[in-house]
Image: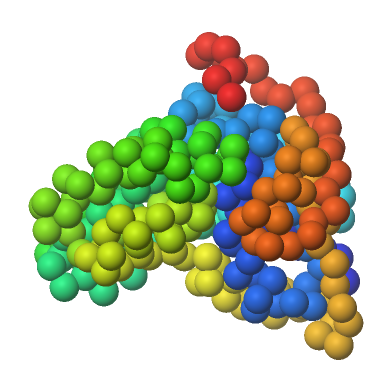
Amino acid sequence: MDSSPVGIFDSGLGGLSVLREVRALLPHEPLIYLADSRYAPYGDKPERFVTARTLQVCRWLVAQGCKALVIACNTATMHAVQALRSELTVPVIGVEPGLKPAAAISRSKVVGVLATANTLKSAKFNRLLATLAPESRYLCAAGHGLVALIEQGDVSSAVIREKLDAYLGPMLEAGADTLVLGCTHYPFLSATIREMVGDRLTLIDTGAAIARQLARKLVEFDMAADPAKAAGIRYLSTKDAAHLHEMAAALLQVEAHAETVVIEPAPALEDGPLTA
Ligand code: DGL
């Protein structure tokens, strides 16, 4: 039995959609949730920055005593999971857009994929696409601006609907019947997407699959916590604990006692100033 925490990390609030699934499956596992909101979004930052910052944050989580890490961010996983696994000694569970489950479910064999620009550009994502059976078509769109709005707590405004309409309209016209939510922020848009498209698109969110993968890894490495003991969650933000507290209440309906932490100095953004 190992009562050390599992670290769950995202550029910001998106990983809360993964935390929700981990909590539901493994309520006895102590968790640390870290939102690097000071530097969100990662999706349009230089790749070098995403890789270096992910390594920096994950080293910090290991130094806090985390026994395993969940990279609850597709963008960070795409760019940094290999480096993390070769450097860190703890198990690292990453996320990736659910293209395979989408292809298995789609009847029209036209699958929409909404993810960040950095995820769609990454070599890892493109290798994944290349391994898939050719009978399905994948229509990929970069959800520019969506993460920044969700970070502010906006999951249903007219602005966000207009953006979604621009991304999903062409997918529907091309016959898509399935939509991969390829960014962990996007499950928080599910209700709005449903209102907009009804049952024309089946939404694919891999949060529950990630939780199951974490459970398997904890057993494999003999790291699971005592199921008879209650476990807490520490919510940490690199930007603003009060905002994380407010957003956890709005998005997950939980009372999160959040703390602000400093993980600095961040790697230089060589390609230009911070946009966040
Ligand atoms: N939640 C993230 C993802 O899954 C990151 C989004 C961002 O920071 O742009 O890709």
- The colour mode here is rainbow
Q: Quadrant of residue 178?
A: bottom left
Q: Residue at x 50, y 24 (%)?
A: 46
Q: Residue at x 35, y 62 (%)?
A: 194
Residue 93, visible in the rendered structure: no
**Percent position of residue 240, x then y:** 77, 35
Depicted 229 relative to depicted 264: above or below: below
Depicted 66 relative to depicted 202: above or below: above
Residue 250, visible in the rendered structure: yes
Depicted 222 relative to depicted 42: above or below: below
- Which of 67/238 is in front? 238
Left or right relative to 136: residue 181 = right
Left or right relative to 179: residue 17 = right
Q: Residue at x 22, y 65 (%)?
A: 200
**Percent position of residue 102, x then y:** 30, 66
Depicted 181 relative to depicted 29: above or below: above
Q: Quadrant of the C terminus?
A: top right
**Percent position of residue 32, x then y:** 78, 56
Left or right relative to 199: residue 256 = right
- Which of 246/8 is in front? 246
Q: Residue at x 21, y 70 (%)?
A: 106
Q: Quadrant of residue 4?
A: bottom right
**Percent position of residue 74, x then y:** 49, 49
Left or right relative to 203: residue 38 = right
